[in-house]
Image: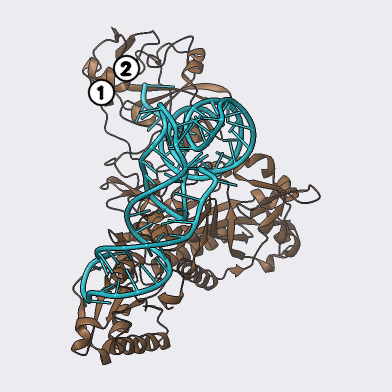
Chain colours: A brown, B cyan
Amino acid sequence: MRFSVALIPTLKEPPVEAHTVSHRLMLRAGLIRPLGSGIYTWLPVGLKILRKVEAIVRQEMDAAGALEVLMPAVQPAELWRESGRWDFYGKELLRILDRHEREFCFGPTHEEVITDLARRELKSYRQLPINFYQIQTKFRDEIRPRFGIMRGREFLMKDAYSFDMDAEGLDVTYRAMHAAYTRIFQRCGLGFRPVEADTGSIGGSSSHEFHVLAASGEDLIASCTVCDYAANLEKAASAPLVAIGTPSDEPMRLVATPGKKSIQEVSAFLNLPESHLVKCLVVEANGRAHLLLLRGDHELNLVKAANALGVGAVQIPEPGRIAELTGGLPVGYVGPVGTALPILADRALESCLAFACGANQIDHHLTGVTWERDLPRPAFADLRNVQPDDPCPRCAAGRLRLDRGIEVGHIFKLGDKYSKALNVTVLDPEGKERTPIMGCYGIGVSRIVAAAIEQNHDDNGIIWPVALAPFEVEILLANPNDPASVQTAETLYAGLTAMGIGVLLDDRDDRLGVKFKDADLIGCPLRVMAGGRALKEGKVEIQIRKGGDPLQVPVAEALVTLRDMLAKLAGEASKGIETWTKS
RNA sequence: CGGGGUGUGGCGCAGUCUGGUAGCGCAUCGGCUUUGGGUGCCGAGGGCCGGAGGUUCGAAUCCUCUCGCCCCGACCA
């Protein structure tokens, strides 16, 4: 591509609303332009990157035996009523009416459509297992779109849906998808990590998320410093903690704590570490109030709480509502001793010797509270978020660390939720009707582009991994009015193109400084200077975008050198990944 | 959805409080200059000041409504 005739509208300054690195750089490098909240046009260079990701995903899905289809983006409400999701899905679902006022939605996902296809086309166990995928634009009307492409409303997604006869078959398919995803992210040159995820209310047996590790990631993931254990924060567990607490021969005592409500305040006032306090949280689940107990220095995990209480979700009531539920108690003094509410305590409290907590009396706390002596042992469950340095639940030696990640892939055993609701059956070898079980597997194709930038950039711009770069090489034509420079640049351009290497030729009649700045911004892995100082000695200058000293090579050797350097860069990228992923 | 902010040429902003008919930088176009890190100088084009209504002799500026966009909130009692 020639810069002079392309549309690559780079910007010195991005619009104010862009805050995250990838959003700013995508706008500045001329990859995308916004059209509305959370919706973007992909400009020529941006689209090249998107297509590279798409090609890698497609190749690996095909290699894993999945079959590509393309389903409608617009789906009839009828189908969603059948699965029960029309009323359940909420405002994220963009609902539209056609000219006959019939209801449709713009698909945020395609379980219904694929399951409908399956019930029409799948008749026999001989057709199974089968796995369909598509790469398609989705629309989810996010509460708050942000971070540009990262959390847009419209986005490009690869989604796949598998059908197996039984759980053993699904296991095989699931593992194949796990392996395919690993290859996809490796080939993209990204530092990533597969982590265990909560299966939530759908209740499947397995779920993994694939996260690109980046400081700006929206999600927290926990991983063991020794073994392979890794899970997202919703799911991550800890091995039992060592017992802490004050000696238990102290009697329980009522202490006046006027105006001291927060754990921090009470801890300072009573001169006790926060870990020796118990945090008492009133929550509501399916209209029933519960008292949840946590160690003072621990945080409640709402997903775990919902799982432990066997409900879809738990709510934190407003302070006024809490007062109603506790007989007029202001928040801060609620406690487990003498409460009428059912109690569920976090596991970390199981071994607590004695603790301080609210006294169910305004401006008072209890100290030296001891299980059995002062109150019966409640039910225990894992309710908290793990913290850095918690012991690993898998191995004896490991400790957990927390990192930020961007979720770019998710694989999930669905079970028979949709195949049952839409009545998919196939005949088994005995001629009996059976309901296949499903898995679903998503990749945020457009999100990968943003995630790659979050992970690979410097102050001057993007640094593309070779596999995703819109062009592997950018040629800077030093001076378009100098015939020798032009000839060198054109020869390189033709040569690289003939070798199948993507190349951007900056042939604009502009100052070199401008070209340098734009080249850094756009971030092609290699930059070649045609003309200038080097050419006076019959050489071109090659610069690796990642850094290092520029290399001077004779013009005649330039093509071979560039090809070899690219191969080396691509190789380094995938080697780096192996050390990241461990497993 | 709740709270806050903001809307002035393509981008970044000033002007709004204290009403008098719109300005700066970048970008664009023309000319000269410069030519290894966003050159310098001269000149030009481009804005019904988000929209509607109102107050006023007069509204970017004041009032009402409306739309867009951005930020914060949905654990720490």
| Image: A65 above or below A145 | below
Query: Dot 2: within a 10 Å radius of its alpha carbon, few (fewer than 14), some, or many (20 or more) residues?
Result: many
Q: Which quarter of the picture shows residue A521?
A: bottom left
Instruction: Identify the image quadrant of the N terminus of chain A.
Output: bottom left
Q: Amino acid at mark 1?
A: Gly
**Amino acid found under the numbered disc labelled 2:** Thr
Q: Residue at x 39, y 70 (%)?
A: A469
Does the residue at mark 1 contact the one at mark 2 (Cβ under 8 Å)?
no
Which percent across, then down, holds residue A19?
Answer: 38, 48
Using residue A459 as the reference point, say whether residue A89 is left or right of it: right
Asked whether A98 or A571 is in front, the reply is A98
Looking at the rendered structure, which numbered label has been put on residue A40?
Answer: none
In the rendering, at what x and y percent does residue A202 appear?
A: 58, 44
Chain at tag 2? A
Q: Does residue A186 sit above or below A368 in this rendering? A: below
- The residue labelled by disc 1 is A245
Residue in the foreground of this view, choosing between B18 and A71:
B18
Task: State the SS at label 1.
Answer: loop
For the point 70% across and 54% down, the residue is: A75
| Quarter of the rendering containing residue A551 | bottom left
- Judging from the image, what secondary structure is the residue with disc 2 in? loop
Please give left or right for residue A393 compared with residue A102 in the image: left
Marking on residue A370:
2
Residue A309 rendering spot, x and y as whole percentages: 51, 30
Q: Earlier in the sequence, mark 1 or mark 2?
A: 1
Residue at the right extreme of this rendering = A100
State the quadrant of the C terminus of chain A: bottom left
Chain of the residue on which disc 1 is drawn:
A
- The residues bearing labels 1 and 2 have C-alpha atoms spaced at a distance of 10 Å
- Label 1 environment density (alpha carbons within 10 Å; few <14, some 14–19, many ≥20): many
